Amino acid sequence: MKKTLSSLSPVRQTAIISAIAALLSVTFTGTVYFIFFGVDERFWAAINMSFLIPWAITVPLGLHMSKQRFELFCITNRLQETQARLRIANKALELRANYDGMTGLLSRDSFFTQLDKLRTAEHLEGSPHVLMIVDVDHFKHINDNFGHPVGDKALSLLGNVFRDTLRENDLVGRIGGEEFGVFLPATSVPEGRIIGEIIRHEIEKTIFEPVEKMRHVITVSIGLTAVAAHQERGTLLGNADTALFAAKRQGRNKVVLFEPGMKGKPQPINKKKQDSEPVPLYSNFM
């Protein structure tokens, strides 16, 4: 590894500088003296003086200056190390701000920000788009029966399914507790329904064992809507949410497309009572 002069210790810097100064002084003095006076009885005395004087001047001065340079070099190194740590910390903060720590998918704010940018992008102008809201069926029962750490494990598995299933340019983010948003750019509604069914199928066949050697089948309901650049984000989310409610009402584990006139009604009254009742642990095991 090569070392610069400023990276050496003050003593080594001073020794190198003094030796160079003495060599130059001897060379210059000897040459000038020889040209004008030749080699006489004072020649070697002049050479000795030209050798000693640079040392006398450069040693104290060089020590002082090289010490300052060495301190500056150390400060510069510390500054570079601090900047590197700051870059790492900023990267970590950026990841925490833009990605969900549980699933590794986009965070809610980041998903909506990228959704707005992508659906109005010039290179996609005129292309059809699809927005989906994916909600885990009976997720509360997983948390209640097996505990929140097991529920977190289920969400992490779903994150893997989305990454493995969706295309490179598709957006997916966790927009709620067990709710995910998926935006499919340059995708028609029929293509979107096929992708929605693939997601639903892949999640349903995912191996999830809340208790060792006991499989629990995870299902999702998906609300899907066509996207137009002129539509407000709130309208799009409302349409997808309405379709999601329809999927829930139709028995869950379904993909439903929003259609004009479709009403997003709350769940039936007796449904709330059913959700409050505990589910036997064997009800969803295979």
Image: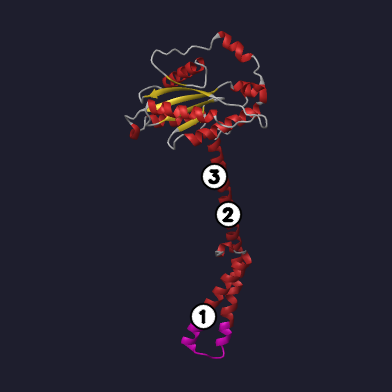
From this viewpoint, which residue is outermost toward the left?
126
Q: Label 2: how many residues lie within 10 Å, few (<14), some (14-19) or many (20+)? A: few
Residue 127 appears in the figure: yes
Q: Residue at x 59, y 32 (%)?
A: 207
Disc on the earlier residue, 1 or 2: 1
Q: Which residue is mark 3?
A: 87
Give the x, y percent position of residue 283: 63, 21
Amino acid carrying label 1: it is Thr
Membership of 250 in magenta stretch: no
Q: Which mark is residue 239?
A: none
Give the x, y percent position of residue 182: 46, 28
Q: Looking at the image, is 112 positioned above or below residue 76? A: above
Callout 3 secondary element:
helix
Q: Is 87 or 185 nearer to us in this picture?
A: 185
Q: Looking at the image, is 31 positioned above or below residue 218? A: below
Disc on the earlier residue, 2 or 3: 2
Residue 97 appears in the figure: no
Amino acid carrying label 3: it is Arg
From this viewpoint, which residue is outermost toward the bottom?
40
Q: Main secondary structure of the magenta part?
A: helix
Disc on the earlier residue, 3 or 1: 1
Q: Residue at x 60, y 56 (%)?
A: 74
Give the x, y percent position of residue 217: 58, 26
Say which quarter of the image contains residue 149. top right
Q: State the extent of the magenta-drawn residues as a range.
A: 30-47
Q: Which residue is mark 2?
A: 77
| Nearer mark to the viewer, of 1 and 2 | 2
Callout 1 secondary element:
helix
